[in-house]
Image (spheres, rainbow, N blue to C red):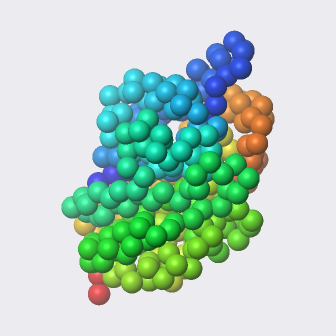
């Protein structure tokens, strides 16, 4: 199974014709690169939109819909996606459950909703009640099959910046307790903090993806019987990178991290997890 992961995109509506042509060139080309190769699933790690309005979703989904593989596109919510609309309305517009799983033969994919509803001033994550119970059952049901969790927010004290105010799931301890019951391999993917970062804690691997507006790149994940391989694909296109910088600089309320810092170090770019050794 092969997956492509997209970090925070923060799509917002252009305010004039200058911005409009910039946007068209940038967002179309980002998705062109993202959809260029074949993957089983193409996953957005949340904050696909900046203000989460119905119009932003409509416009960005019409870009996505123009690609043949768009039916394999999956999107979890980020805090920005959930700023303007109720969860009920988001579910209705996007036609997706808030959290769900896919039991593929190679791995179980778990998609979380870590967002608060219409909460512009508190942007940390939270996973409560029914979803926590559901996660517990999912981990149990996966038995020894590898688990890949997709969450917008990171677990506290794992990847870059995940101890800073608003930059982690506030009840991380409850989730970690559930994760600790996993037999076999577990990888936790997240966005939110806008930098590439890979960390390891209590037998789990934590892979954070940079915002596309900070580092023009996406992640690639391959799961075979023997190993899980994660790589970073940097989109090397100076004109597109210039557009990225312009769009990011003009976006109010966007945490722009300089490209060099957002890209992380070499250890943050790739990871190989041996499934044979960890089978015992
Ligand atoms: Fe973000």
Query: Residue 24's x, y, as percent?
Result: 58, 20
Q: Is residue 93 visible?
A: yes
Left or right: residue 214 compared with residue 70: right
Question: Looking at this view, is 56 or 203 the one in front?
Answer: 56
From this view, report whether residue 122 is shown above or below residue 40: below
Q: Is residue 264 visible?
A: no
Question: Looking at this view, is 269 or 203 the one in front?
Answer: 203
Single out the residue that lies furthest toward the top: 17
Query: Residue 125's x, y, as percent?
Result: 60, 62
**Quadrant of the image containing the N terminus:** bottom left
Question: Looking at this view, is 111 or 225 the one in front?
Answer: 111
Query: Residue 63's x, y, as percent?
Result: 47, 25
Residue lying at 60% horizontally and 67% vertically, measured from the top left: 169
Residue lying at 43% horizontally and 35% vertically, measured from the top left: 93
Left or right: residue 44 compared with residue 210: left
Query: Residue 176's x, y, as percent?
Result: 51, 79
Question: Looking at this view, is 106 or 141 the one in front?
Answer: 141
């Amino acid at each position: 199974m092969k997956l492509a992961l997209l970090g925070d995109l923060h799509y917002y509506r252009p305010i004039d014709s200058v911005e409009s042509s910039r946007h068209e060139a940038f967002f179309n080309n980002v998705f062109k690169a993202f959809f260029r190769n074949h993957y089983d699933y193409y996953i957005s790690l949340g904050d696909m939109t900046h203000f989460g309005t119905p119009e932003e979703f409509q416009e960005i989904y019409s870009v996505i819909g123009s690609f043949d593989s768009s039916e394999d596109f999956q999107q979890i919510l980020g805090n920005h996606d959930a700023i303007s609309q109720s969860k009920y309305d988001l579910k209705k517009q996007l036609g997706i459950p808030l959290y769900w799983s896919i039991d593929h033969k190679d791995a179980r994919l778990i998609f979380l909703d870590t967002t608060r509803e219409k909460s512009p001033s508190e942007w940390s994550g939270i996973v409560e009640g029914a979803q926590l119970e559901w996660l517990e059952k999912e981990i149990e049901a996966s038995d020894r099959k590898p688990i890949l969790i997709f969450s917008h927010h990171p677990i506290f004290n794992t990847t870059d910046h995940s101890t800073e105010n608003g930059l982690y799931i506030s009840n991380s301890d409850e989730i970690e307790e559930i994760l600790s019951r996993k037999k076999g391999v577990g990888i936790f993917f997240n966005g939110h903090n806008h930098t590439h970062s890979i960390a390891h804690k209590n037998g789990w691997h934590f892979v954070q993806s940079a915002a596309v507006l900070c580092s023009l790149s996406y992640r690639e994940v391959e799961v075979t019987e023997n190993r899980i391989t994660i790589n970073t694909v940097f989109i090397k296109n100076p004109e597109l990178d210039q557009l990225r910088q312009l769009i990011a600089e003009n976006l109010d309320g966007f945490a722009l991290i300089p490209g060099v810092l957002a890209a992380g170090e070499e250890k943050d770019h790739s990871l190989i997890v041996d499934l044979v050794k960890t089978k015992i």
